[in-house]
Amino acid sequence: MITVTGLTKNFDGFRALNDLDLHVDKGSIYGLIGVNGSGKTTLIKHLTGILRPDFGQVLMDGCPVYENRQLKQRTGYIPDDLYFFSSTNLNEAARFYRSLYPNWNEKRYVEMTENFHLNKKIRMSRFSKGMQKQAAFLLTICAMPDYLILDEPIDGLDPIVRRQVWNYIVEDVAEREMTVLVSSHNLREMEGICDSVGILSHGSMLIERDLDELKTDIHKIQVAYRSAPENPYEGLNVLRRELRGSVELLVVRSSREAAEEIIRRHQPILFDILPLSLEEIFICELGGETSELQNILF
């Protein structure tokens, strides 16, 4: 289990993280999302023990992460910007990882290099960006981590390899109860893989919920009336409202039952409740007001 409480970090007077809380259950996949500059990478560097908190706590299994060698031996981390020694090939990198991680799985390493079709003897600096991502993932997952921290893990990968990567992750979560935190801008893919999500905004946790629960609380509705009633949505928390001809498009935060009861009082001639995607929820929670964002939402 990962627990972050009251995490605050300043850089030269700029507050990158502000009293942030985060909870990731053991054996789950947690999606961390936010616009650029929201603090995702800074948070991840605290989770991996790279940065020391100014205030607050970052715990795994109830123990502080910073300068904790035992926890780091159980944690795999793939950053967005990869670095490999210029003259190192995959076999040499595996030898290095083997010396650092006591749970290294040699059999899995052999199998994964064959599945990913990676040449183990040429320098990794000659790999394409996608091949370097594959190599980083292969080395990290063969270390058999209890905690896996991923920053844009599928950027640059083709669809077939992306599916392979997610299959390995889901397999380890199911079989070993590995705990995963993944930060990505690919919200459609995150929606299909994550158990819960946290939305960061300006260094604070805007919302943190189980994904299924989050979707049951926010709804997109289209409704039309023969004659417009006065205050038809009183009692509903309307996050967004737009008129398209005679049809109103709404996003409301409430239970489905409450929304249906309130709106049907006014006998609409059209009433549909539509599912919202994680991408739409993200845009709505951050209050995007540009026409581009509204076109995505509606």
Image: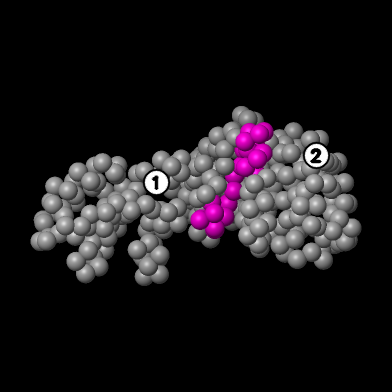
2 and 1 marks in contact (CB < 8 Å): no
Question: From the image, which quarter does the N terminus lie in?
Answer: top right
Q: In the image, which residues are magenta?
A: 169-190
Q: Is residue 103 above or below residue 50?
A: above
Label 2 and label 1: CA atoms lie apart by 38 Å
Quarter location, residue 283: bottom left
The answer to whether residue 77 is left or right of residue 255 is: right
Residue at the image position 67 percent from the left and 33 percent from the top: 176
275 and 133: which is toward the camera: 275
Answer few, some or many: residues within 10 Å of disc 2's Cα (few below 14, many 20 plus, some between 14 and 19).
some
Question: Where does label 1 land, which residue?
Answer: 215
Residue 276: x and y in percent read 38, 53
**According to the image, what is the colour scheme of the structure?**
one colour
Q: Is residue 151 above or below residue 257?
A: below
Residue at the image position 19 percent from the left and 66 percent from the top: 246
Quarter location, residue 172: top right
Q: Is residue 68 above or below residue 203?
A: above
Disc number placed over residue 105 in the picture, else none? 2
The answer to whether residue 45 is left or right of residue 97 is: left
Residue at the image position 26 percent from the left and 41 percent from the top: 257
Residue 229: x and y in percent read 11, 56
